[in-house]
Image (tube, coloured by chain):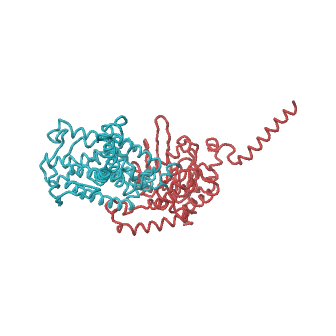
Amino acid sequence: MDIGTIVDAAFSAALGPQAIVFAIAAIGLNVHFGYTGLLNFGQAGFMAVGAFGLAVSVVTWDLPFWLGLVIAMFATVVLALVLGVPTLRLRADYLAIATIASSEILRLVFGAVEFKETFGGSNGLTGFARTYQSLNPYDGGLDIGVVSFSRNDLWSITVGWSIVALGCLLIWALMRSPWGRVLRSIREDEDAVRSLGKNVFAYKMQALVLGGIFGGLAGVFHVLKQASAVPTDFNTTFTFYAYAALLMGGAARVLGPVVGSVLFWFLIAGLGSFFSQATGGTDPLIPASIMTDTQASLVRFIVLGLGLMLLMILRPQGIFGDRREIAIDGR
Amino acid sequence: MAADVSTARAALEGVPREPGAPKPDPIVKGSNITRTFGGLTAVDVDHIEVQRGVITALIGPNGAGKTTLFNLLTGFDEPDQGEWDFNGTSLGKVPAYKVARLGMVRTFQLTKVLSKLTVIENMRLGATGQRGEKFFSAAFKSLWSAQEDDNTKRADGLLERFKLDAKREDFAGSLSGGQRKLLEMARALMVDPELIMLDEPMAGVNPALKQSLLGHVKSLRDEGRTVLFVEHDMDMVRDISDWVIVMAQGKIVAEGTPQSVMADQRVIDAYLGAHHDTDITEVDIAEIEAEADAELDEETRE
């Protein structure tokens, strides 16, 4: 058993590009669910629209990279409006149903054979990330023992953590303002907010668009860091992992989604590396009669699930949450 | 201000004691308002007017349509038909938040405090026209901090008046039922409404707090606001209201001063009951004693 490899895998994943994708997506979910109480179960749909907005613009339509970015963000805003207009006047559940359905529809459409010319079918699109990669200022990768990143990943985490930092700064500035107070009030009781002369629908729409833009950014970053846009990446599991990360970190806290995502990937990668080492080799730590190495990659999810359950029992507010807030729910 | 109250009251003297009576200076006027839920007609009001500057009580048995009428007037529900206006502005199809901005603010029967916000944050939310509530100026504190300070000052003044200043930094969810009622009323005042509509302000409030709530409602009128409230507590209705509107089965069945309404045979039959003026505990004790005596007599005879 090589502890160093496990630590390296865990920290590299926790600080690496994949955790950043989840952090950005979870920041968006935090605006939706944590602050405003909107149940968006289709963050993967916002990501897919952002990702394919960029990929289709650059690859299929042959537009410049930067214009592609603008189109990607514009497309996520349109998706938020399309989802919000019919559902935000209704009860919260309708948005949940509409978002989960639309994210599945989008994934299937982007992967459909019929639209292969535009979206590239199930293989997706590649070749849109050249401008992004050409901006990479680094000469080589990074390996300082505890963490190691390739040259591309090093550039991606530089860009990614900058986006996360700016996003957190924006959320912090917005949520301490009276605007943020209206959102939190809507989460508590929208009729009360209405009775005080606030246009609840408009605020919910603004929150949906803002969180959707973060989803779109996460999608764009996801396809840029791996230089390919594949429809199957944007399945509903993604949304639920992002929710898990958000709840671990603590909803309605600025750093909650970021710390949650880092911890989530630390555990996934660390446990994965531990179990694959414990079951691999000629004389495994855990004998094959208990667990084979093919089972090991699944066991990490079981352990992670147990960990999540323990967290919810012992610290239901998440790592950053306020215990007093949870106590009020019990009344 | 006090002079206004007495003139407004004096103006009511000449108003006929009949359902839908026209008032000399109405702040709210409505006609032919109906609302049905399936086969049930919840509200069917031919005409209603609410006098400016006084306290009007809306009473009636459960299911009479009082709260539904509140919802309709404030835009929280849409009627099947009917028209009504506030200060001459027609309110048909006007959404609830715009009704509130016009100066007609309501509270709720089941108190709606924002549990996970502190008391002072609840209050600040009530202020209208906040620059910091606009998305594009929200991120820049310098654009709204001065206004926020003014609002906080006003909120602190109201909290002191409603004796909630000690609870300033507590979560609203940790307040007792009566304190929530007070907070909701204080928060509504942050909107600076001309007409404040209270839906059962006394429900679930202990007798001591009731007295101070009564004082607060009176003070709303004395500072020139119009109050319309729904209440089952007859003591309160008698104590503070200048005019009473009685609803039953969706219709207005009687109107008048508290004294005239409580003497009205139709109101007694529909709502108050024959013993409404006597203390019910005394009646019970006398009856129970008489019954017990009778039983004892029977037993001794055996």
Residue A154: x and y in percent read 22, 56
- Which residue is more in the foreground, B142 or A244? A244
For this view, does A71 lie left or right of residue B117?
left
Residue B280: x and y in percent read 71, 46
Residue A213: x and y in percent read 28, 52
- Which residue is more in the foreground, B127 or A231? A231
Residue B155: x and y in percent read 48, 64
**Residue at horizontal 21 percent and vertical 40 percent from the top:** A110
Question: Is residue A13 visible from the viewing direction of this image?
Answer: yes
Question: Is residue B10 visible from the viewing direction of this image?
Answer: no
Which residue in the rendered view is the most extreme toward the front?
A283
For this view, does B194 lie left or right of residue A23?
right
**Residue at horizontal 15 percent and vertical 50 percent from the top:** A128
**Residue at horizontal 25 percent and vertical 45 percent from the top:** A48
Q: Give the image quarter of residue A159.
A: bottom left
Total label count? 0
Which residue in the rendered view is the most extreme toward the top?
B302
Q: Chain B colour?
A: red
For this view, does B195 lie left or right of residue A155?
right
Q: Chain A colour?
A: cyan
- Which residue is more in the foreground, A98 or B108? A98
Which residue in the rendered view is the most extreme toward the right?
B301
For this view, does A56 lie left or right of residue A203?
left
- Which residue is more in the foreground, A93 or B134? A93
